[in-house]
Image (cartoon, rainbow, N blue to C red):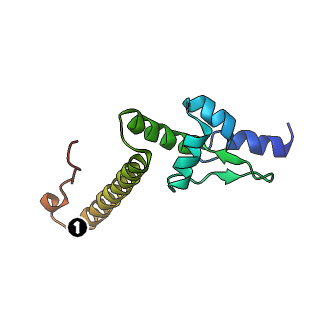
Amino acid sequence: MSAENASVVGRLDDDGYPAYTMGRATDVLGITPAFLRAVGEAGLIVPLRSEGGHRRYSRRQLRVAGRVRELVDQGTPIEAACRIISLEDQLDDALRLNRDMRRKLGEAGQIPAAAGAEIHPPAG
């Protein structure tokens, strides 16, 4: 195997590697190209473009599009579904950052243990 081929094979394990064409992505998710384009137009995912201008998607992006489809299948408009997922992702990031900061401050002895209690999002 050439070094170039080995490099490509190694990237296939990368969740962010854009390995899926529009056609393959829609087949995997059972959606239409228009649905996938709408998720992209909402800014939730930004596909990489091949040299020929074709959209390419990663497994991570397909998971996000799949989450949108689940909400749409439950009756949520696509724009609202994209906004919900965006806000969920922002909340997850903020909670992770908060948890990391509290852990670091706790290790440094800068906050009492009770003050480092975990904050959880409301059940819903």
**45 over 75 or under it: above or below:** below
Residue 100 location (% of width, % of height) = 33, 59
Residue 112 location (% of width, % of height) = 15, 64
Tell me the residue at 35%/60% (across/down): 97
Tell me the residue at 52%/48% (across/down): 39
Tell me the residue at 61%/34% (across/down): 26
Q: Which residue is mark 1?
A: 109
Tell me the residue at 22%/67% (across/down): 109
Q: On the rendered image, what quadrant is the N terminus found in?
A: top right
Q: Is residue 21 visible?
A: no
Task: Looking at the picture, tell me which residue is in the foreground, 19 or 9.
Answer: 19
Residue 3: image quadrant is top right
Residue 98: image quadrant is bottom left
Residue 30: image quadrant is top right
Q: On the rendered image, what quadrant is the C terminus found in?
A: top left
Horizontal relation, residue 23 to residue 52: left or right: left
**104 over 72 or under it: above or below:** below
Residue 6 location (% of width, % of height) = 78, 41
Horizontal relation, residue 44 to residue 108: left or right: right
